[in-house]
Image: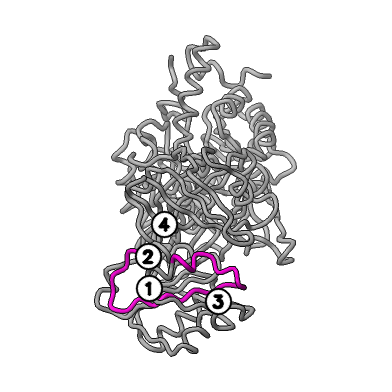
Amino acid sequence: MAKKKENSAILSQEKIADGIYSMWLKTEAAEEAKPGQFISMYTNDGSKLLPRPISICEIDREKGALRVVYRVTGSGTGTELFSRMKEGDIVPVIGPLGNRFPLERAAGKRVFLIGGGIGVPPILELAKQLECDKKQIIVGYRNEETFLKEEFEENGEVYISTEDGSVGTKGNVMDAIRENGLEADVIYACGPTPMLRALKAYAEERQMECWLSLEERMACGIGACLACVCKTKEKDHHSNVNNRRICKDGPVFLSTEVEI
Amino acid sequence: MDMRVNIAGVEWKNPVTVASGTFGSGAEYADFVDLNRLGAVTTKGVANVPWEGNPTPRVAETYGGMMNAVGLQNPGIDVFCERDIPFLRQYDTKIVVNVCGRSEEDYCQVVERLAGEDVDMLEINISCPNVKEGGIAFGQDPKAAEKITKAVKKYAKQPVIMKLSPNVTSIAEMAKAVEAGGADAVSLINTITGMKIDINRKTFVLANRTGGVSGPAIHPIAVRMVYEAANAVRVPVIGMGGIASAEDAIEMILAGASAVSVGTANFHDPAVTLKVIDGIEKYMEDNHFQSVEEMIGIVK
């Protein structure tokens, strides 16, 4: 009974790109949060029951605060309600939830940290905490609105791809890897499923260790409702079928474990 | 104040349980809720063999509720008996095992297996709208519902609760049918079949196309059906459907429910069941009820 839904106060909020917002929350969840975990954020609108699972972008243990960077997914959505909230407003949260990126796998290795679209934010705290031999951060955006770019530059070598070619490599993160002739031993990634699928194939071809953070529609966020499962190669110990729970067993999986 | 209720000979410490499928077998919620406080824990449906469930997306939010088409993913009765029953037995609460199946034989196998297990009641799910075979096929035809009830009763060592679907013309007729088949109690409502379309992607939101709607949006429908069922049968009714507060639960009890299940609201607040229990107690105090039993079905 250690966990609870907590009323968390907004410390600050700003728009950092078109439809992309950055919010700092004062929350007990900061105490134990690790890179790759997420929080369930609730709106204060009674017609919206379910939490929004939002990945943790930065952790400030001293201030007891978490930063989330999220995309407004449409008009009338929960994320739109979050975007209208101000400093001092209350966001009910549960967290930290899920597993984490296994940072220890990077020791002495050449690493790719890859984020695409709204999968970019969780890569920031990972980039800050990761200790490795060569830290190559590859982030993919739609256009010149390369949010969090400066913060990434303080934490490693940064390579950018944009769909419209306005910054860095034109195309996606795979194109950026090829164009820059980058090589690594371990990959950590979060982003849209097509990107993760390409990375899984890339890593398996080269027999590289590749950690993918997956996303799926969730309801409970704590592993009970079985909404957010992914297919696995082997039978899962908990489900006793070839399904694992993204919210509880993930969101981070070894690429060879999952079918995406 | 006496919070106890008697459901088909099983005494619960209070009238509050959880709706099957919203609470797993309690392990995940035990971090948030003292399971000892619940009248009963109703488990996620379990079949004779493991089920993979439906493709994703399996859930979508709707106004004042949600839709799901999980498709009864479950680890099968063997794993359930080895892992989930011993887990729940650590707590001072009743165990209601929800049973699902694709055929009469499937249901009977699970019920027979549970006859030798330390569980308190069985809830037979003949109302899942999200699996193609079984489930709902038994829950929309009174004759089929009566027949499956009779079949499982032959193997059951624990009292049998038949879980009814709202996707029928007459809930009273369905309740009477399972009572005639020997049901010891009925529970209702399961989810209401719905559909949601993504207008940007121009396709169904759920991989299964349709799903079961639940949550506060369906509560008035559930209250009406609980009322109709409770007035049609003599066996106890367990009321559910959109209960998110003590007030919602009390409505159900006044309509005729002997106990209530909290479902979707667990996703909004994992500790909501405790608030419901405390709220019922406060209402009893304020309204001078000595026992929950006194409240059941007093609105006629």
**Dots 4 and 3: beta carbons under 8 Å?**
no
User: In which quadrant of the rendered view does residue A141 lie?
Assistant: bottom right
| Magenta segment includes A235 | no
Residue at label 4?
A58
Front tag of 4 and 1: 1
Label 2 marks a residue whose chain is A
**Of the two numbered discs 2 and 3 in the rendering, the one whose residue sits closer to the viewer:** 2
Residues packed near mark 2 inside 10 Å, few (<14), some (14 to 19) or many (20 plus):
many
Dots 4 and 3 on the same chain: yes
Pointers 1 and 2 within a single chain: yes
Mark 4 or mark 3: name the one nearer the start of the chain. Answer: 4
Of all residues, the one furthest to the top in this rendering is B288
Please tell me how crowded label 3 is: few (under 14), some (14-19), or many (20+) other residues with Cα within 10 Å: few
Amino acid carrying mark 1 in the image: Gly
Amino acid type at circle 4 is Glu
User: Closer to the camera: disc 1 or disc 2?
Assistant: 1
Residue denoted by label 1: A156
Q: Residues within 10 Å of mark 1 (few under 14, many from 20)?
A: some
Q: Earlier in the sequence, mark 2 or mark 3?
A: 2
Q: Secondary structure at mark 4?
A: strand
B139 vs B248, nearest the viewer: B248
Is residue A144 inside the magenta stretch? yes
Circle 2 sits on which residue?
A126
Against B171, residue A228 (above or below) is below
Q: Is residue B143 left or right of residue B115?
A: right
Q: Does B212 appear above or below B96?
A: below
- Of callouts 1 and 2, which one flags the residue occurring earlier in the amino acid sequence? 2
